[in-house]
Image (cartoon, grey):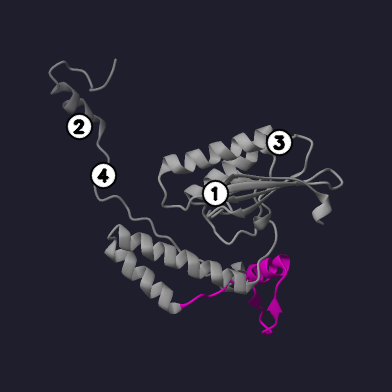
Amino acid sequence: MISAVNRVEFVSDRMSYLIVRGLWCDIFLNVHAPTEDKMEDIKDRFYEELEHVLNKLPKYHMEIMLGVFNANVGREDIFKPTIGNESLHEISNDNGVRVVNFATPKNLIIKSTMFPHHNSHKFKQYLKDRIDKLATNSKNKNIRDLYRGINDFQRGYQPRSNLVKDENDDLLADSNNIMNMWRNYFSQLLNVCRVSEVRQIEIHIAEPLVPDNSDFEVEIAIAKLKTYKSPGSD
């Protein structure tokens, strides 16, 4: 393996890359991005440096970026196809948006969002996210959000499941079967009676209490007008 190494370069304390002689002479970049709470200029300098390193590398090489980006990449449709549907997060934070914005114009794919994660990995990520959120709320003195986060943390991690039971208590995992089950359920719940069973209700219309004005009364009312004209436009 060492004989396949073509070049190693340490760019900074946050960045290095390795070029190996593979089928397409692959390039492996190792990065350690600033955390979410770092200043904006620190994050900007990191991605500017990463952009500079990537631009000076040969374009025909396959580029694989590894390391720690300290980013929560969500599952927003607007970021696809750069991301997939299997991210551990629903909404991207600032670092996550930066990673996506960096990868999209270079046709890079964030592979960690492309495949399902084991529940143990979800639990570790859940703990990390909760601890980071508690630390942020404590630092910003958001007392209400802090206590709410502590209560959620005490309840523990609860993995989401899309399985449902049918009327025979059998588990359904297929999305089409689940949709058909809910369709039948609400059809029986809402359609409680047929059209033939609906009673016909007689509607009685009350007779007007005030009779219509006679022609003589209309003539008297018009004569009392100052201009001897009925109101309204001519």
Q: Which residues are magenta?
A: 156-184
Q: Determine contact: label 1, label 4, CB under 8 Å.
A: no
Secondary structure, mark 4, is: loop
The residue indicated by pointer 3 is 57
Q: Earlier in the sequence, mark 1 or mark 4?
A: 1
Which mark identifies residue 13? Answer: 1
Q: Does 8 lie within the magenta span?
A: no
User: Closer to us: mark 2 or mark 1?
Assistant: 1
Q: Quadrant of the N terminus?
A: bottom right
The vertical placement of 202 against 17, above or below, is: below
Q: Earlier in the sequence, mark 2 or mark 3?
A: 3
Secondary structure, mark 2, is: helix
Q: CA distance from mark 3 to mark 1?
A: 19 Å
Q: Which residue is located at x 65 percent, y 74 percent?
A: 163
| Snapshot quadrant of residue 102 | top right
Q: Which residue is located at x 28 percent, y 18 percent?
A: 233
User: Closer to us: mark 2 or mark 3?
Assistant: 3
Q: CA distance from mark 3 to mark 4?
A: 95 Å
Q: CA distance from mark 2 to mark 4?
A: 12 Å
In the rendered image, residue 150, in percent from the top left (x then y), is placed at: 37, 72
Q: Amino acid at mark 1?
A: Asp
Asked if residue 124 lies left or right of residue 66, the reply is: left
Q: Does 177 lie within the magenta span?
A: yes
Q: CA distance from mark 1 to mark 4?
A: 96 Å
The residue indicated by pointer 4 is 211
The residue indicated by pointer 2 is 217
Q: Earlier in the sequence, mark 2 or mark 4?
A: 4
